[in-house]
Image: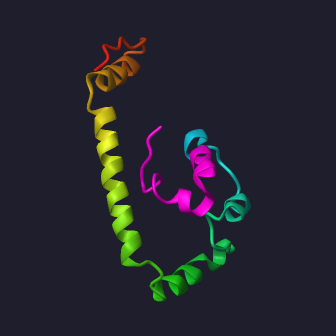
Amino acid sequence: MVITGGTSVLPPPLVGQGAAREIVLLADIFEAAVAQRLGLLHRLVEPERLDTEVLALTDKRLLNRLLETELERAFQNEIGAIMRCFGTADAHEATVAFREKRPPVFQGG
């Protein structure tokens, strides 16, 4: 699993550390109503009202600079983690082995 898109920083303040870890590690798919109950969604809207609601929220400029700074830091940390994982000889071996339909032979690097 790869944690990207601010996943490392956004859920904990909304749902708490325990629920955030469960969401990230299990990667379960759940209904929108469950996400709202957990605090991940502010409101649910019908699909035909989505564009109108989004425009109303963006007009209010709800995002502030602090959140942008935290997200930028999270994105940089996530990119670093991804590069450490996928920039290794073992990652390359996994891709080649998958393509060749054989078990990978990992060397630990």
Residue 96, quarter of the rendered image:
top left
Location of the C terminus (image quadrant)? top left
Task: State whether residue 47 is above or below residue 53.
Answer: above
Q: Is residue 30 left or right of residue 104?
A: right
Residue 84, quarter of the rendered image:
top left
Query: Residue at horizontal 48%, vertical 81%?
Result: 62
Q: Is residue 73 left or right of residue 67?
A: left
Q: How many marks?
A: 0
Please check the rendered image and state whether residue 66 is part of the magenta-colored stretch, yes or no: no
Residue 72, quarter of the rendered image:
bottom left
Measured from the top left, where is residue 42 in percent x and y? 63, 72
Query: Residue at horizontal 37%, vertical 70%?
Result: 68
Query: Residue at horizontal 43%, vertical 12%?
Result: 103
Measured from the top left, where is residue 90 in percent x and y? 31, 21
Task: State whether residue 94 is above or below residue 36.
Answer: above
Q: Is residue 76 left or right of residue 98?
A: left
Q: Which residues are magenta?
A: 1-23
Camera-nearest residue between 93 and 39: 39
Measured from the top left, where is residue 19 in percent x and y? 63, 50
Please check the rendered image and state whether residue 11 is part of the magenta-colored stretch, yes or no: yes
